[in-house]
Image (cartoon, grey):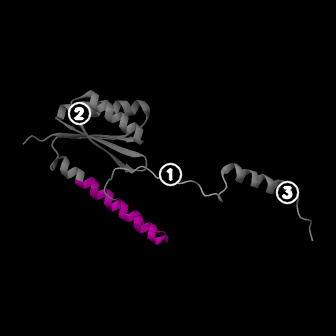
Amino acid sequence: MEQRAQGFVEATGYVAAIEVADVMAKAAQVTIVMAHKVDGPRVCVICEGDVAACQAAVSAGKAWCESRGTLIGTNVIPRPSGGSGELRSLLEAMKARKAAKKAERLVKRGKPAPAAPAAPVAPAAPALKPAPATEAGPVAKKAKKEAKKNAPKRPAK
């Protein structure tokens, strides 16, 4: 069984990570495995291929990030012990732990915990409901606010 190398480029911002993935895919014969949101604005782009291709792709991604000031770090693993399947399961476990900690913090603050993400479903067309007749639109609200502001003041008692 052929073991493929893995390359990692961590950048600041999701848009930068998408562009890094594009640069990496064009620079060498690699497969972009995923773009993993690490924390805050940090996103790690992971590629797979032979060692030389991964090194070339990571070098191209690193150069692109350095030219724009979004580089956080890079790495190439020539022969990962578990392959990309183990890496994906590790990343999913990290996401689950992070979500559980977030839910725990929200519960401590007295806020409801977020619902667990459901399986992806094709979005249904949104049903359009007419606005209630009693609800004032933004123009009416602005006019009411102006009228209140310009109303004469009550005399002091």
The residue identified by callout 2 is 55
Locate residue 112, reporting x and y percent: 46, 69
Locate residue 139, reporting x and y percent: 70, 48
Locate residue 20, reporting x and y percent: 34, 34
Q: Which residues are magenta?
A: 89-117
Locate residue 74, reporting x and y percent: 30, 40
Nearest the viewer among 47 and 156 is 156
Using the image, determine if residue 42 lies above or below residue 145. above
Q: Earlier in the sequence, mark 2 or mark 1?
A: 2
Task: Give residue 120's mark.
Answer: none
The residue identified by callout 1 is 128
Nearest the viewer among 11 and 113 is 113
Q: Residues within 10 Å of mark 3 (few under 14, many from 20)?
A: few
Using the image, determine if residue 10 lies above or below residue 132. above
Task: Give residue 151's mark.
Answer: 3
Q: Residues within 10 Å of mark 2 (few under 14, many from 20)?
A: many
**Quarter placement of the N terminus:** top left
Q: Residues within 10 Å of mark 1 (few under 14, many from 20)?
A: few
Q: Earlier in the sequence, mark 2 or mark 3?
A: 2
Q: Residue at x 41, y 30 (%)?
A: 67
Q: CA distance from mark 2 to mark 3?
A: 72 Å
Q: Earlier in the sequence, mark 3 or mark 1?
A: 1
Q: Is residue 109 magenta?
A: yes
In the picture, measured across the screen, residue 143 lies left or right of residue 118, that is: right
Q: CA distance from mark 3 to mark 1?
A: 38 Å
Badge 3 element:
loop
